[in-house]
C-alpha cells in the first residue's frame, strides 16, 4: 500500500484582523458572493462586514443572549440561532 499521507499546515498567518466586537466572536458565516460576512459575539450583537474594505456595514443589537450560531442561506438572507 502506497503512503498517501499529506503535509498538514500547523500554523497560519492572518491576512486581516476584524476587530469591532466588545466580546469574544463565537459565530462567523460567509456570504456566497465572498464580499460579506456576518459575525456573532458574546456582546449580544451581530456585525455585517464588507470584506473588501474590512469595515462594519451594520451592527444589529437586541439579542437577549450571546450569539452562538449564524447561518447564511443561498439567497443571501441569513438567520440567527441563539
Image (spheres, rainbow, N blue to C red):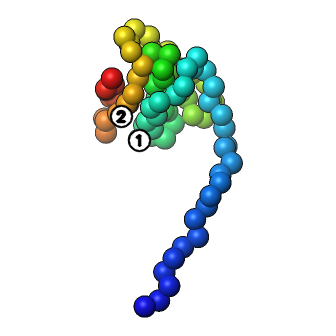
Residue holding disc 1 = 32
The residue nearer to you, when weighing 15 against 52, is 15
Looking at the figure, which quarter contains the C terminus?
top left
**Marks 2 and 1 in Cβ contact (< 8 Å):** yes
Residue holding disc 2 = 72
Mark 1: few/some/many CA within 10 Å (<14, 14-19, 20+): few
Element assignment for label 1? loop
Give the residue furthest to the top: 62
Residue at image position (51%, 76%) is 5
Residue 76 makes an appearance in the image: no
Residue 19 makes an appearance in the image: yes
The residue nearer to you, when weighing 38 against 65, is 65
Mark 2 or mark 1: whose residue is earlier in sequence: 1
Residue at image position (62%, 30%) is 18
Is residue 9 placed above or below 57 in the rendered structure?
A: below
Residue at image position (48%, 80%) is 4
Percent across and percent down for residue 79 are 31, 26
**In which quadrant of the rendered view does residue 23 lie?**
top right
Looking at the figure, which quarter contains the N terminus?
bottom left
Percent across and percent down for residue 38 are 46, 29
Percent across and percent down for residue 67 are 41, 23
Left or right: where does residue 15 sit relative to residue 82?
right
Amino acid at each position: 500500500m502506497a503512503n498517501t499521507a499529506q503535509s498538514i499546515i500547523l500554523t497560519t498567518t492572518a491576512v486581516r484582523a476584524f476587530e469591532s466586537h466588545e466580546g469574544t466572536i463565537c459565530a462567523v458565516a460567509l456570504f456566497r458572493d465572498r464580499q460579506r460576512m456576518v459575525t456573532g459575539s458574546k456582546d449580544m450583537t451581530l456585525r455585517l462586514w464588507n470584506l473588501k474594505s474590512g469595515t462594519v456595514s451594520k451592527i444589529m443589537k437586541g439579542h437577549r443572549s450571546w450569539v452562538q450560531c449564524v447561518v447564511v442561506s443561498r439567497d443571501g438572507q441569513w438567520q440567527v440561532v441563539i
